[in-house]
Image (tube, rainbow, N blue to C red):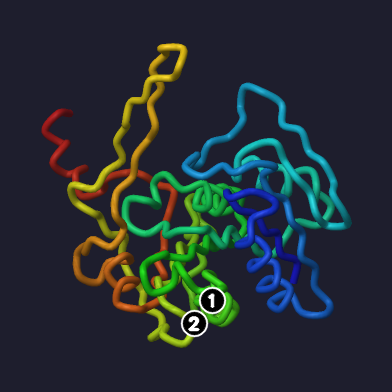
């Protein structure tokens, strides 16, 4: 198996090293693992592509490349330049430092990479490690992902739903905020929503008198709807959420017939 890995935390992020180990085991002795990752952290860029400026690519070593761009740029570079002579069988993105459950998924560069791969017709999985009081002080804060990641991906490859339609399915996997030994299992889950917990801004004045705005987040331990990704994560389970890039609100289409 040929696997392309990327992330949004940057080429030197520890989660990418966890993912490389995972991908190496999945690829097997006759497979290949290629890395195409951002030069700098790209958290929160979503499915952004560098459409109005060129993107520099640098080879660091065999099968390891750095892109001055977004995670989606990295996938485009991997598929159409770095691996253009033999496209990957699978794209893995992560392991993100922090959860991409619930509304976080909408902002995530980690998911943006998986989404772009799916749009390009390549099976893709985004993987993220939830943080909380039970794992943030561990020696290895990626312990849950490290211990259970390979088996989770294998199960998805064997038993997951993979489609070849225009908006193919990709997967959002979040590992719970517990140690590896405390993970209770895997649950298929829908995307949740943390009410009254959206992003905001906090103004600060620089010594020059200019105003700057810092984007602020919110606590990640608040409950969401039962059976949602964040809900099962906080209960100690790995969440697996099938996703598509099609943003159509199909439940509203019939009601809109009145405007025709």
How many marks the image carries: the answer is 2
Location of the C terminus (image quadrant) = top left
- Residue located 64% across and 67% down the image: 19
- Residue located 49% across and 82% down the image: 180
State the image coordinates of residue 222 (x, y, percent, origin top left).
23, 61
Residue density around tag 1, few if under 14, some if 14–19, many if 20 or more, within 10 Å = many
Q: Quadrant of residue 147?
A: bottom right
81 versus 138 height, above or below: above
Residue that protrudes farthest toward the top in the picture = 209
**Mark 1 touching mark 2, by CB under 8 A?**
yes
Give residue 180's mark.
Answer: 2
114 versus 25 height, above or below: above
Q: Quadrant of residue 107?
A: top left
Q: Quadrant of residue 177?
A: bottom left
State the image coordinates of residue 129 (x, y, percent, origin top left).
48, 65
- SS at mark 1 in the image: helix
- Residue located 41% across and 76% down the image: 178
Among numbered discs 1 and 2, the one appearing first in the sequence: 1
- SS at mark 2 in the image: helix
């Amino acid at each position: 198996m040929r696997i392309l890995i990327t992330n949004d935390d940057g080429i030197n992020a520890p989660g990418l090293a966890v993912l490389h180990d995972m991908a190496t085991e999945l690829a097997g002795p006759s497979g290949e693992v290629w890395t195409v990752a951002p030069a700098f952290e790209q958290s929160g860029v979503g499915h952004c592509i560098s459409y109005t400026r060129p993107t520099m690519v640098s080879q660091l070593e065999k099968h390891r490349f750095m892109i001055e761009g977004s995670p989606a740029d990295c996938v485009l570079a991997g598929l159409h330049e770095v691996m253009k002579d033999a496209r990957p069988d699978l794209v893995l993105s992560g392991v993100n430092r922090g959860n991409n459950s619930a509304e976080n998924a909408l902002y995530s560069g980690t998911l943006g990479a998986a989404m772009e791969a799916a749009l390009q017709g390549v099976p893709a999985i985004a993987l993220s490690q939830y943080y909380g009081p039970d794992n943030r002080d561990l020696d290895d804060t990626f312990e849950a992902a490290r211990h259970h990641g390979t088996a989770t991906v294998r199960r998805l490859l064997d038993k997951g739903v993979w489609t070849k339609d225009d908006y193919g399915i990709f997967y959002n996997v979040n590992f719970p905020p517990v140690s590896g030994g405390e993970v209770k299992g895997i649950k298929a889950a829908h995307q949740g929503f943390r009410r009254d917990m959206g992003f905001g801004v906090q103004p600060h004045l620089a010594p020059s008198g200019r105003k700057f705005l810092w984007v602020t987040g919110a606590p990640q331990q608040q409950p969401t709807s039962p059976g949602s990704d964040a809900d099962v994560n906080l209960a100690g389970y790995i969440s697996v959420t099938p996703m598509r890039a099609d943003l159509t609100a199909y439940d509203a289409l019939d009601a809109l017939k009145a405007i025709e």
